[in-house]
Amino acid sequence: MTKEAFDIAVEKRLARAQQREFCEATIKAVFDLMAREHYDMPLEHKARLVSHLCLMVARAFYGGTVPLMNDAAIAELSPQALKLSERVLTAFPNLGEAEKYLLAVHFDMKRLEE
């Protein structure tokens, strides 16, 4: 995915966001955190992460849950991905534990594909 295609995908997702400003702030905060932690991922993965973050913001505002992952899948997640997820979710105390694991999958996608 090119940077231009990524930017277009992000803009399309933000256009559908229920809380656009909060979604944009969340994306910026997460990307800043990733940069500070030297945690890089391909643009394709970042585009999926943006979509997840916007849906996560909507769940935080309007309710909703994500399905719980099974223990075997959770065991495969790296400690670094779990730590990043926990740090992000401190801004969303009303979201459940399952959200942490799903977000960690996005952070761990590159490693899990190798």
Image: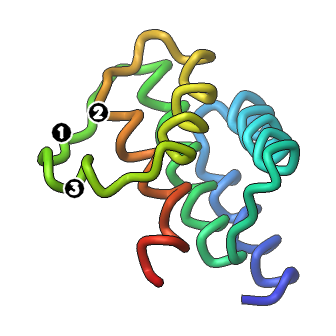
Which of the two labelled residues, at mark 2 and mark 3, occupies the earlier sequence position? Answer: 3
Q: Secondary structure at mark 3?
A: helix
Instruction: Specify whether 48 is left or right of 97.
Output: right
Which of the two labelled residues, at mark 1 and mark 2, occupies the earlier sequence position? Answer: 1
| Residue at numbered disc 2 | 98
Judged by depth in the image, the label closer to the viewer, 3 or 1, is: 3
Tell me the kind of residue under disc 1. Leu
| Residue at numbered disc 3 | 73
Q: Looking at the image, is 113 positioned above or below residue 16? A: below
Which of the two labelled residues, at mark 3 and mark 1, occupies the earlier sequence position? Answer: 1
Judge by depth and name the residue closer to the eye, 4 or 82.
82
The answer to which quarter of the image holds residue 76 is: bottom left
Mark 3 to mark 1 CA distance (whole Å): 10 Å
Q: Residue furthest bottom?
A: 1
Judge by depth and name the residue closer to the eye, 18 or 73.
73
Q: Looking at the image, is 52 positioned above or below residue 93? A: below
Instruction: Specify whether 20 is left or right of 114.
Output: right
* Contact? badges 1 and 2 (CB < 8 Å): yes
Where, quadrant-wise, is the N terminus in this rendering? bottom right
| Residue at numbered disc 1 | 68
Answer few, some or many: residues within 10 Å of disc 3's Cα (few below 14, many 20 plus, some between 14 and 19). Answer: few
What numbered label is drawn on residue 31? none
Question: x, y (%) of residue 101?
Answer: 36, 41
